[in-house]
């Protein structure tokens, strides 16, 4: 089975202080740590597990800058066979649609029975690109996949619905699946593994090589325009307890006691 | 005709889902401001009863009836909706940002060559052009976006808008759906219900919940001790389950359990909407997080900004003392 996995490098903002940059259209990223998008990490693991079971190839694709090459190397280190990076000034200002157009153009040239993407990217939070790529490739898709059973010409997958419910659907191959977290336990990437692939030449493709017209790529091809980014108003709903650790613990215990919760 | 706002009715296992009424609530408000018509579109099989439930919220309910639509299937739904939307050219089409909408909306928008704005928490029409607010970077920032052309599809975050009783008596128009001859490339097989194993966190009056901020599974007992001291059950956010640190039955959230305890204590949890929407009914929400900008504080009645490794043991000790009558 030949599998293509789309991966994206994203900043880790969960623990970080976030501020808006000078353009007013993005956050300041200079001091942030970057890593593979959480959902994509499950997707590459799933691809490698399928390859280990069924044979075939795994190719990873990212649309991104030279800095983003590190996520491709990480995927090569865990077992991907090939990597491609899509990079062109014309890609700047891409929305979910323009991103899908570039990725689909690249995937068309590759061998694939399955395309795996993350369910959502932790930075833009679109949950848009995977099923859009499927439509551009004219193949069926399933989003939020939590289990995959492969057959000859079809796959049976579990999709996560709400409240712990799942649905089981069958899809003709080739197909695109967007992977939900928890589907597997991603393996640890060793420094030695990264070192082994450090010198691998990773091909870069621009809009022209993908056969894209200027009006299809980046801001020109985008259907949604980002006007401004801002920090959410900080207004707390309730009260922040202030003081030393002992003091805030005391305050909270008094609140609980006042409610009669401490028996 | 550009004077229609379409809302896709979401239903499952014979029930209209809440998101439908939330979208109709927002749709009504937008329709009123634009002098537009609010149309609910229901794909189903023998779903007359469901249509009646939404009729009081829409000007028209268009039911497309076919046995293939009994259960959601993005493939068959897409074909039906693409035809309808291409013919109607609505001003705007609202779909839930749910497990169904996430599966359907992107490919539908791609097929129709219309803009798609996902996971929207606020929505306006600014001289006919669609402007939306959506959260980015895990809720740490918000983005204002504009559709570059009319007729956009917008997926709406559950809980972002409120349902409104409109008292309208929408007309129900039922048409027989048909499927193109070709076999569906995607086939719905069955539902699998959540396994009901272990404790039911939804039954507990006090729930103490641990998030990714704990960092290491060996430290979970720290939070468990706090739960025990409070007479609470231990629950968690999704990453803790994804990493197999606690079983799925402990997961709070849209894809886990919805709970309504009198006290919800969230430790090292950032407060993604998929988590928060499931604790909205709690009597009191208390959050402990080292990041003062964590979105969870926007939902908490009381917040403690601090390191959980310091705050939690102090709290456990004080609670034990208070309970021992000291
Ligand atoms: C379709 C879908 C369904 C989902 N369903 C669910 C669901 O049901 N339930 C759910 O929870 N999530 C769900 N999610 C995931 C959700 O989007 C978030 O990714 C998740 O809730 C984040 O969990 P967290 O807050 O524990 O982790 P993070 O977002 O990583 O936050 C960790 C927090 O810990 C804090 N922290 C770190 N160290 C410390 C310390 N020493 N002391 C104090 N604080 C500290 C950090 O400041 C941070 O705020 C779903 C996502 C999708 C796409
Ligand atoms: N620039 C990109 N390069 C490669 N894959 C991407 C890119 N952007 C999005 N994707 C893929 O699409 C998924 C969903 O992203 P999004 O639609 O932006 O939430 C991600 O998890 C990736 O698998």
Image (spheres, coloured by chain):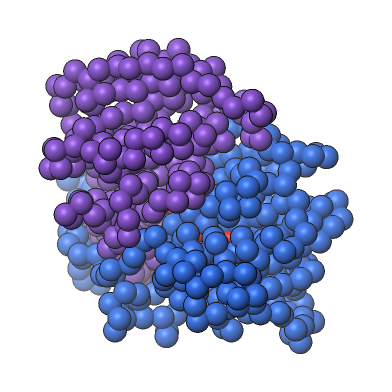
Chain colours: A blue, B purple
Determine whether, in the image, residue B83 is placed left or right of residue A66. left
> In the image, residue A193 lies at what x, y percent?
77, 77
Reply above or below: A8 against B101: below
Picture layout, residue A146 above or below residue A223: above
Q: Residue at the spot x=37%, y=13% of the render?
A: B48
Question: In this image, B25 relative to B117: left or right?
Answer: left
Residue A176 locus on image (x, y percent): 64, 49
Q: Quadrant of residue B35?
A: top left
Q: Is residue B23 visible?
A: no
Give the camera-side residue of B320 and B209: B209
Q: Residue at x 67, y 43 (%)?
A: A147
Q: Nearer the viewer, residue A164 or B290?
A: A164
Dividing the picture into quadrants, the one containing residue A124 is bottom left
Q: Is residue A69 left or right of residue A225?
A: right
Image quadrant occupied by the C terminus of chain A: top left
Residue A159 image point, x, y percent: 58, 39
Q: Residue at x 15, y 42 (%)?
A: B34
**Number of labelled discs?**
0
Q: Quadrant of ligand 1?
A: bottom left
């Amino acid at each position: 089975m030949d599998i293509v996995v789309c991966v994206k490098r994203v900043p880790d903002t969960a623990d970080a202080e976030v501020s808006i940059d000078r353009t007013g259209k993005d956050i300041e990223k200079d001091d942030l740590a970057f890593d593979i998008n959480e959902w994509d990490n499950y997707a590459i693991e799933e691809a490698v597990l399928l390859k280990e079971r069924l044979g075939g190839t795994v190719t990873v694709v990212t649309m991104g800058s030279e800095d983003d090459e590190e996520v491709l190397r990480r995927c090569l280190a865990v077992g991907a066979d090939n990597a491609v990076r899509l990079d062109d000034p014309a890609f700047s200002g891409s929305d979910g649609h323009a991103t899908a157009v570039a990725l689909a153009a690249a995937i068309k040239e590759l061998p694939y029975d399955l395309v795996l993407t993350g369910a959502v990217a932790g930075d833009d939070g679109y949950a848009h690109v995977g099923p859009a790529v499927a439509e551009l490739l004219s193949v069926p898709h399933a989003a939020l996949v939590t289990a995959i059973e492969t057959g000859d010409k079809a796959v049976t997958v579990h999709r996560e619905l709400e409240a712990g419910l799942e649905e089981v659907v069958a899809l003709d191959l080739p197909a695109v699946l967007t992977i939900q977290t928890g589907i597997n336990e991603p393996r640890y990437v060793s420094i030695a593994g990264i070192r082994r692939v450090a010198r691998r030449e990773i091909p870069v493709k621009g809009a022209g090589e993908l056969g894209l017209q200027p009006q299809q790529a980046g801001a020109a091809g985008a259907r949604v325009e980002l006007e401004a980014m801002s920090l959410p108003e900080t207004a707390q709903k309730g009260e922040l307890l202030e003081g030393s650790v002992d003091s805030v613990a005391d305050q909270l215990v008094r609140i609980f006691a006042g409610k009669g919760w401490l028996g | 005709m550009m004077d229609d706002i379409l809302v896709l009715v979401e239903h499952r296992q014979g029930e209209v889902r809440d998101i439908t009424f939330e979208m109709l609530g927002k749709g009504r408000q937008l329709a009123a401001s634009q002098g537009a018509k609010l149309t609910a579109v229901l794909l189903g099989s023998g779903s007359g009863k469901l249509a009646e439930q939404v009729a009081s919220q829409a000007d028209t309910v268009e039911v497309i009836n076919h046995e293939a639509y009994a259960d959601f299937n993005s493939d068959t739904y897409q074909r039906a909706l693409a035809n309808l939307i291409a013919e109607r050219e609505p001003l705007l089409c609202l779909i839930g940002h749910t497990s169904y909408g996430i599966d359907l909306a992107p490919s539908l928008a791609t097929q129709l060559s219309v803009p798609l704005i996902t996971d929207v928490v606020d929505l306006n029409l600014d001289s006919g052009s669609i402007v939306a607010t959506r959260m980015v970077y895990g809720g740490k920032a918000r983005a204002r976006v504009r559709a570059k052309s009319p007729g956009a599809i917008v997926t709406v975050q559950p809980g972002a808008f409120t349902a409104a009783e409109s008292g309208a008596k929408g007309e129900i128009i039922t048409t027989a759906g048909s499927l193109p001859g070709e076999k569906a490339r995607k086939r719905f097989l069955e539902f699998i219900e959540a396994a009901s194993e272990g404790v039911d966190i939804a039954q507990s009056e006090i729930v103490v919940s641990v998030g990714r901020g704990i960092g290491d599974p060996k430290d979970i007992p720290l939070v468990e001790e706090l739960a025990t001291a409070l007479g609470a059950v231990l629950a968690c956010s999704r990453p803790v389950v994804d990493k197999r640190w606690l079983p799925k039955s402990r997961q709070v959230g849209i894809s886990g359990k919805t709970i309504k305890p009198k006290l919800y204590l969230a430790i090292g949890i950032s407060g993604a909407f998929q988590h928060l929407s499931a604790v909205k009914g709690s009597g009191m929400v208390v959050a402990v997080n080292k990041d003062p900008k964590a979105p969870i504080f926007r939902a908490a009645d009381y917040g403690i900004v601090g390191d959980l490794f310091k705050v939690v043991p102090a709290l456990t000790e004080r609670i034990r003392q208070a309970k021992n009558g000291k």
